[in-house]
Amino acid sequence: MFKKVQCLNSSGGRKTKLSKVKVIEELRQDFSLDLLLDCSKMARSSYFYHQQRGKLDKYADIKPVIMEIYNQHKGRYGYRRIKDALRKKGILINHKTVLKLMVELGIRSIIRKKRKYNSYKGEQGKIAPNILKREFKAEKPQQKWVTDVTEFRVGDKKLYLSPIMDLYNQ
């Protein structure tokens, strides 16, 4: 115990801070944390920082499996699908943990944008010349005729209506 107390009083670089944290953890059962931190002249935040750094990675064995699934599916799987694939392999893990591990590994799923439906296919067919030039009145019958094509869907069939109109008397 005396050597441990001597280790607390030594000052130095990073190695001694990590060793001080180990000694404090061993002596913490017998003494209060404040007393040990005071003796070691270490800040409370430094103690907890080095204590966290010294811990082993809890998910070190799962990370390679996540990377394998991610690479196997060419980056198309997100955290939910990776969680399902892990579950099929017998590894029970929360989806939020999978998301956190994917962020740590620096991997993200490839997101494809959904395209909106657009029926416009450019100009179809031939455009007729503008003969009327917006003069929709005729002096004699059967001088100016107009038509329009309308498509109807009735059941499984398409029907087309093309009325012809004389511009003399509508």
Image (cartoon, helix red, strand yellow):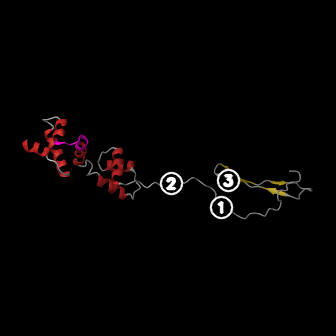
Residue 43: in magenta span = yes
Badge 3 is on which residue? 158
For marks 1 and 3 on the same chain, the one whose residue lies earlier in the sequence: 1
Label 1 environment density (alpha carbons within 10 Å; few <14, some 14–19, many ≥20): few
Q: Who comes first in sequence, dot 3 or dot 2?
A: 2
- Nearer to me, 97 or 138: 97
Q: Residue at x 19, y 52 (%)?
A: 13
Point out the tag, 1 or 2, that comes first from the N-terminus: 2
Where is residue 23 shown, x and y percent of the image? 14, 44
Identify the disc placed on residue 113: 2
Q: CA distance from mark 1 to mark 3?
A: 22 Å
Label tally: 3
Q: Position of residue 146 (x, y in %)?
A: 81, 56
In the image, is 170 to the left or to the right of 152? Answer: right
Mark nearest the camera among 3 and 2 is 2
What residue is pinned by disc 1?
122
